[in-house]
Amino acid sequence: MLSMLLPAPLIGVLTVGLMLVNLMGIGLMLAPGILIKALVPIAPVRRQATRYLLAVADLWVLFNGLIYRLLQDVRWQIEIDGRIEPGRSYLIVCNHQSWADILVLADALHGRTWFPRFFLKRELIWVPIVGVACWALDMPFMRRHSREAVAKNPKLREDDLRATREFCEKYRSEPIAAVNFVEGTRFTEGKRARSGSPYRHLLKPKSAGLSFTLNAMGEQFAGLVDVSIAYKPPAKAGGSVVWSWLCGQQQTLVLQAEVRPIPQAMLRGDYENDARFRADFQNWVSELWAHKDARLDELKIRAKDGLARPVAPSASH
């Protein structure tokens, strides 16, 4: 709540500083588990190390949440439509606008799901502490080759699919919350225009990795958690969403999650070689994306103006 007393840039600096202190402290706590996973090849020992690492990662999310609420006037609107069952596995899909998405999503889901495992860009593996921690937590790193590179060398497409398969194989029989930013990269108006996206607030979804995840693990998922995050525009035109968030200027961001059943027909099929299944799967994802795009129309207005969720009128008698 210090944002009510201090200027926004100072709040941003303090938020970054305390989050770095938290990260370094958590990094020290993670070190024993990371060393075990790096040096010990015995599977049961590695599984116990992973459980320890997850417990520490939960503390990281908890302490970050305390930092936000100490420094910022947090009035985020977190809305969950449907029931997330404790102890069950879920596949989480979310729109992607900012680096803040990961931290906001982790905070919103804390205590509701298992610690979320994100499909990450491979470049993050080189970020101090973060990269090795994500590796130890078995998060898959995706290379995200450009369309031009894939067009020149179609075999590059296999890199991300291979990482997805390895991740799915590892957690085929263990509870997990797997997060997929289906757009594959952060949304910008420039990217939307260049890609020819038919959506107002989203890039075209990349369906292949999602299909492989469902094909390998779909039976263990209790459902799909469809998350939409809306921020208000930064105070400065062209400003950074993540910096405005760190400065406490995203008090009214809205995160809405809809828990959906996963159609059985989408769980089994050969996305690569079955053209009919591929078309059906893409149509299903496109319907999800069209619904999300329409929902973001309302959520962005609410985030901008600080509006509460409209209350449905009661049925007349």
Image (cartoon, grey):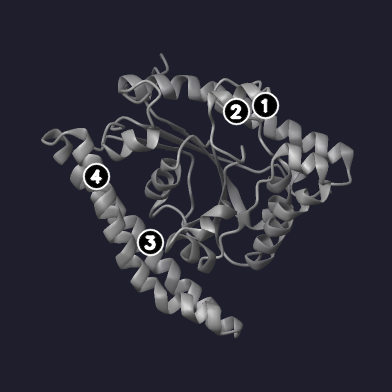
Residue 310 badge: none
C-alpha gap between disc 3 and disc 1:
37 Å
Rendered residue at 13%/36% (across/down)? 6
Q: Disc 4 vs disc 3: which is toward the camera?
A: 4
Do the residues under discs 3 and 1 have CB atoms within 8 angstroms?
A: no
Name the quadrant containing residue 185.
top right
For residue 13, which numbered disc appears in the image? 4
Identify the residue under disc 1: 195
Which label's residue is closer to the chain start, 4 or 2? 4
Circle 3: element type: helix
The label nearer to you, 3 versus 1, is 1
- Judged from the image, the secondary structure of the residue bearing numbered disc 4 is helix
Q: Position of residue 206 (x, y in %)?
A: 68, 39
Of helix, strand and loop, which one carries label 1?
helix
Q: Which residue is mark 2?
A: 191
Does label 4 or label 3 sit earlier along the sequence?
4
Q: Is residue 275 left or right of residue 257?
A: right
Amino acid type at image mark 2: Lys
Instruction: Find out whether the residues at labels 2 and 1 contact each other: C-beta distance under 8 Å.
Output: yes
To which residue does mark 3 refer? 58
Q: Is residue 127 left or right of residue 218?
A: left
Report if residue 40 is visible in the image.
Answer: yes
As measured in the structure, the alpha-carbon distance from the residue carrying label 4 to the one carrying label 2 is 30 Å
